[in-house]
């Protein structure tokens, strides 16, 4: 639907690139919305819980309104159980790590640290497929880790390493999540898979919030607006646009465009949050992106796999 409406007079290549670019800008804005919610005192758990509830509801409604609701009936019980568990231990946990990092670091720094995950993913997939790590794998890893060191800047003592730890942990966890789920995702409708993942993540955060007495409806208007934006813009729109774009231009071209996501986050953070970057941090960011681009394409970013932050 997205693709057919956008194409109008555009060819597949242009329409696909526009869709994936729109999805990338949308995904890159999520850290900004989270920071805005935190700025008015919102707690991480209700923000994630309500964001997942809204995304899941929108995805199920989209599935119900689609012409192919039978895709849910084609889902095996084994795959359904796997996706429910993956939504809690993978999808939801990665989102929690990312949002935890945002409490301690600038949005731009969290974004670049987290975006080292394609390099870890490439290494994990090579190991998973029992391949020998190539010089390109090693070079990509060295570039990314060198970039991390520079992004943290010369004033290491001023960095809150709780944020760094959460971002790196989230990146590694995301790589593990993608490695272990990609085969299931490939045989299940992306809409169905993400609806189940979002639902189980929502249930997990609702349970955590209830148990910890942090689940409250008493959020400031800006926090509610941020949650709504994360559900509508970062959730439904970005996922639908990304899937439609991938169908038009393929996962490899889409993956290259989505590597611009941390640059989008950084730009928005400068404009809306007043964040600043030094020269060394900019060089570090460039090295991280170089490492991601240098990843062997066979193990590139799996565009068809729901991503915990965007599907988050």
Image: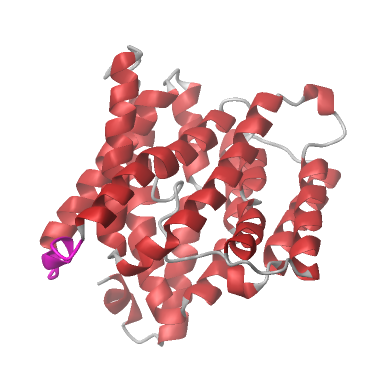
Q: Quadrant of residue 261?
A: bottom right
Does residue 193 appear in the picture of this structure?
A: yes
Which residue is drawn at the image coordinates 26% and 48% (left, top)?
81
Q: Position of residue 180 (x, y in %)?
A: 47, 55
Which residue is drawn at the image coordinates 48% and 50% (left, top)?
177
Is residue 7 highlighted in magenta? Answer: no
Q: How many marks?
A: 0
Residue occupying the far top of the picture: 213
Q: Is residue 182 above or below residue 312?
A: below
Q: Quadrant of residue 76?
A: bottom left
Does residue 219 appear in the picture of this structure?
A: no
Q: Is residue 203 above or below residue 151?
A: above
Name the residue nearer the viewer: 180 or 169: 180
Picture quarter with the C terminus: top left
Magenta part, dominant SS: loop
Q: Give left or right: position of 191 versus 253.
A: left
Q: Quadrant of residue 248?
A: bottom left
Q: Position of residue 103 (x, y in %)?
A: 56, 26
Q: Is residue 178 above or below residue 275?
A: below
Q: How is the image coloured?
A: secondary structure
Which residue is drawn at the image coordinates 80% and 69% (left, top)?
135
Q: Position of residue 273 (x, y in %)?
A: 59, 34
Q: Which residues are magenta?
A: 66-75
Picture quarter with the N terminus: bottom left
Is residue 72 highlighted in magenta? Answer: yes
């Amino acid at each position: 639907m997205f693709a057919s409406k956008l194409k109008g007079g555009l060819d597949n290549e242009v329409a696909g690139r526009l869709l994936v670019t729109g999805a990338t800008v949308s995904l890159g804005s999520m850290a900004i919305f989270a920071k805005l919610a935190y700025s008015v005192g919102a707690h991480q758990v209700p923000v994630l819980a309500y964001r997942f509830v809204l995304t899941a509801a929108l995805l199920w409604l989209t599935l119900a309104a689609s012409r192919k609701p039978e895709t849910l009936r084609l889902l095996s019980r084994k795959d359904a159980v796997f996706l429910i568990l993956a939504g809690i231990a993978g999808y939801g946990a990665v989102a929690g790590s990312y949002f935890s990092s945002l409490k301690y670091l600038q949005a731009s720094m969290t974004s670049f640290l987290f975006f080292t995950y394609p390099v870890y993913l490439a290494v994990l997939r090579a190991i998973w497929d029992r391949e020998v790590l190539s010089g390109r794998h090693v070079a990509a890893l060295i570039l990314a880790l060198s970039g991390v060191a520079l992004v943290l800047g010369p004033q290491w003592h001023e960095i809150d390493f709780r944020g760094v730890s959460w971002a790196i942990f989230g990146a590694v966890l995301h790589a593990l999540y993608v490695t272990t789920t990609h085969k299931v995702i490939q045989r299940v409708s992306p809409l169905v898979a993400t609806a189940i993942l979002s639902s189980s993540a929502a249930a997990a955060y609702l349970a955590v919030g209830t148990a910890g007495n942090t689940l409250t409806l008493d959020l400031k208007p800006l926090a509610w607006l941020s949650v709504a934006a994360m559900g509508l813009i970062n959730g439904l729109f970005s996922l639908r646009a990304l899937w439609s774009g991938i169908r038009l231009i393929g996962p490899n071209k889409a993956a290259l465009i989505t590597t611009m996501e941390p640059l989008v986050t950084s730009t928005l953070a400068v404009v809306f949050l007043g964040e600043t970057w030094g020269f060394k941090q900019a060089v570090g960011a460039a090295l991280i992106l170089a490492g991601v681009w240098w990843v062997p394409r066979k193990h590139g970013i799996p565009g068809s796999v729901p991503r915990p932050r965007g599907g988050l």
